Image: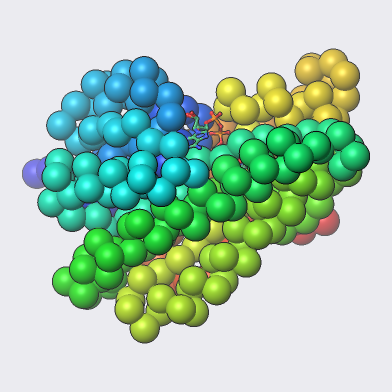
Amino acid sequence: MTRAGRLDGRIALITGGASGLGAATARAFVREGARVMIADIDEGRAAELARELGDGAAFVPCDHTDRGQTEAAVAATLAAFGALDILHNNAGGPFAGPVESADDAVLARVIGVNLVGVFKMTQSALPALRESAARRPHGASILFTSSLQGIKARPNYTVYTASKHGVVGLVKGLALELAPANIRVNAICPTVTETPMLRSFLPGMAPDMDEARARLKATIPLGRMPEPEDTANAALFLASDEARMITGVALAVDGGQMAG
Ligand SMILES: NC(=O)c1ccc[n+]([C@@H]2O[C@H](COP(=O)([O-])OP(=O)(O)OC[C@H]3O[C@@H](n4cnc5c(N)ncnc54)[C@H](O)[C@@H]3O)[C@@H](O)[C@H]2O)c1
């Protein structure tokens, strides 16, 4: 007898789904029965992952800061799979450095990608999510990859921290605004995790990468660095009906850092 998947029959769109946390989540969602549209600016990696995942996935080139492209990504999802039940706003970009070093281009990029882009993607997806929520007893779901920097701060990451706190504000507002429509909205707040983005983060902590990793690990009560699958597992839970009574939360995936 085949096991029922935790996301059987669901259609998800994951931005930034070609790499790191988004790719781990795409794999977990497909394993649990969902079909996933990988929406990413990196068309090559998105196509490669979609090939790996077979019938459970497709890809669409998408820069979520461009409204035309977010609209097209939703249209591609509906054309490929017929509905949209889960939007995972995961795409984001790093910035490490003193606040004075963030010139206008940096501010526009970091706030644009981490905050304005997720607004646009969400606005584009809402008509399809409302339709899904009206059909399903436990509604539809929107996830955001914020960051531990969405709920606490760290020196030299102020611009990134402000953008990710903005995401948590967006989650709380949307959770209340969309609850009557039966759409749940939650954030995942991972601590620093081994993905390609890590190379941009670690130099803010120590000049040497190994030293930075060791320092970081020493701050995690569970004593190990998180893996992308840890964040994917949190996303899987929040996207599934197991979390049907959970909305408006910012869930830390941090090995206990927030407890201290
Ligand atoms: N890795 C970490 O330590 C960490 C910790 C906390 C939060 N985060 C957040 O997790 C998310 C994913 O990061 P990751 O570590 O997997 O990084 P990553 O670099 O491995 O993946 C990011 C993906 O997003 C895509 N992307 C970038 N800009 C985009 C845009 N404008 N439109 C669409 N796609 C875009 C990239 O092409 C890439 O495939 C980001 O929002 C990041 O801020 C990461």
Residue that lies at the very extreme toward the left in this rendered image? 1
What residue is rendered at 73% in x and 30% in y? 201
In the figure, is residue 26 to the left or right of 216?
Answer: left
What residue is rendered at 67% in x and 43% in y? 108
Q: How many marks?
A: 0
Q: Is residue 169 above or below residue 104?
A: below
Of residue 210 and residue 168, the one placed in the foreground of this image is 168
What residue is rendered at 40% in x and 69% in y? 184
In the figure, is residue 246 to the left or right of 81?
Answer: right
Across and down, in percent, residue 224 comes to 69, 33
Q: Is residue 90 above or below residue 185?
A: above
Q: Quadrant of the C terminus?
A: bottom right
Of residue 132 and residue 106, the one placed in the foreground of this image is 106
In the figure, is residue 216 to the left or right of 58?
Answer: right
Across and down, in percent, residue 87 comes to 36, 53
What residue is rendered at 85% in x and 16% in y? 208
Q: Is residue 155 above or below residue 134?
A: above
Of residue 234 and residue 175, the one placed in the foreground of this image is 175
Residue 27 is at least partly visible in this image: no
Residue 99 is at least partly visible in this image: yes
In the figure, is residue 119 to the left or right of 112?
Answer: left
Of residue 100 and residue 47, the one placed in the foreground of this image is 100
Across and down, in percent, residue 99 comes to 87, 42
- Quadrant of ligand 1: it is top right
Q: Quadrant of residue 219?
A: top right
Across and down, in percent, residue 12 comes to 29, 49
Which color scheme does this rendered protein use? rainbow
